[in-house]
Each structure stands twice: as structure tokens, then as C-alpha cells.
Amino acid sequence: FLLNEQKEIGDNTVINVYYKRNCYDVLIQDPGNGLKTVSGNGKQLFGDTIHLSAVMKNAYSGITWHIKQDINLYGFNVNTLQQTFTMPASNLTFVANLEFKTFLVEVNVIGNGTVTPGTKIVRYGESVNFQFVPDDGYKVKTVLRNQKQVNFTETSYVTNFITSNIELTVVFD
């Protein structure tokens, strides 16, 4: 503490004491490297209002914060990117657990043949290499991606950098 001044008033002594607030660390861990920006981390004073804010990269759709210390932060919502809380008398480590965006790639086959892989869930940015195997006497006539014709080889089609749901229709004739 800091002693500011001492004054005597009659038989009484008045002492003004000022306490210096302790400083603690707020650390943000991003094990998946999915956060674009973060604010509110660093050195913080006990009792201050902390505004923790994070922005995710495009590949992610949700967050769950985990607080490493066994501490309850009143009003802290583990599923919200923006947080406001009062700094406790403790260092804090927040771990950002992020959810990848996922998309459905639905495969429809018309005619006699198979497509592998079939319908599947993929993460943002992934590619899928589809292989076509026509039955004897058949060939791939048309490949449609979201009802639009696409270029393909006799035996395959590759989707590049998926950022939305896809409906792939392969027509064997």
C-alpha cells in the first residue's frame, strides 16, 4: 500500500492509505489457430471491467471457451465471442475451442453405376475426389454440381475448396 499523508486533527490522527491494485495476466490460447483477432488479453488490474472479444476465421462457426482456472466469472457465457467480466484476483487462461464449419455433399446417382465416396460431411475448405465406376456397357453422361453441368473426366470429378452444401448428380447412360 501507499501512505499518502498523515494529518493530526485535535486528539485524532487521520491517515490516508491508498492500495495499489494487483495486476494479473489474461491469456488466450487458440490451439486450432482459428481466431483472426483477439482483444482483452494481457495485463489487467484487479476489479477492472474486462472486454474480451474474438473474431473467428471463415472456417469456423462456433466457439466454446474453457477457463483453465477453477473460478466462476459472473455472467461469462462460454459460447459467446464477446465477453464482459470483472477481473478477479487471479491470472486467467482462456482456451478457445472452435467448431469447424461443415457442409453436406450429397451424391445422387441416376442410371447404372456407382460413385465413391457417397454422400458425406466435409469441413470448410476441403476438396473431395469422386470416382465414377459405370456398370458394363455404360458410361458417365453428365455430372451436375448444384444442378449446373461441370467438367469431369471419364472416371472422376474433384470439388475444390468447399464453402457450402453441394448436391452432386452423376448420370450414367
Image (spheres, rainbow, N blue to C red):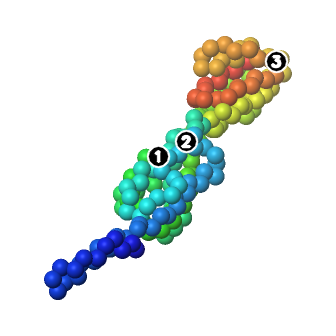
Of callouts 2 and 1, the N-terminal one:
2
The percent position of residue 171, horizontal first and vertical second, equals: 70, 18
Q: Amino acid at mark 2?
A: Thr
State the mark number for residue 37.
2
Q: CA distance from mark 2 to mark 1?
A: 8 Å
Of labels 2 and 3, earlier in sequence is 2
Classify residue 8 as left or right of residue 93.
Answer: left
Q: Is residue 172 above or below residue 78?
A: above
The single residue placed furthest to the right in the displayed view is 136
Dividing the picture into quarters, in which one does residue 108 lie?
top right
Name the mark nearer the viewer: 2 or 3.
Answer: 2
Q: Residues within 10 Å of mark 1 (few under 14, many from 20)?
A: some
Secondary structure beneath label 3: loop
Q: Nearer the viewer, mark 3 or mark 1?
A: 1
On screen, residue 62 above or below 29? above
Residue occupying the point 64% across, 48% down:
32
Horizontal side, residue 42 vs residue 74: left or right: right
Q: Residue at x 75, y 28 (%)?
A: 130
On the image, numbered disc 1 is attached to which residue? 53
In the rendered image, residue 34, in percent from the top left (x then y), is placed at 60, 43
Upstream in sequence: badge 3 or badge 1 = 1
Give the quadrant of residue 104.
top right
| Residue depicted at 70% across the width and 26% down the height | 160
Residue to which mark 3 is pinned:
154
Question: Which disc, if any, is residue 23?
Answer: none
Labels 2 & 3 near each other (Cβ < 8 A): no
Question: Quadrant of the image for the N terminus?
Answer: bottom left
Tag 2 near tag 1, CB within 8 Å: yes
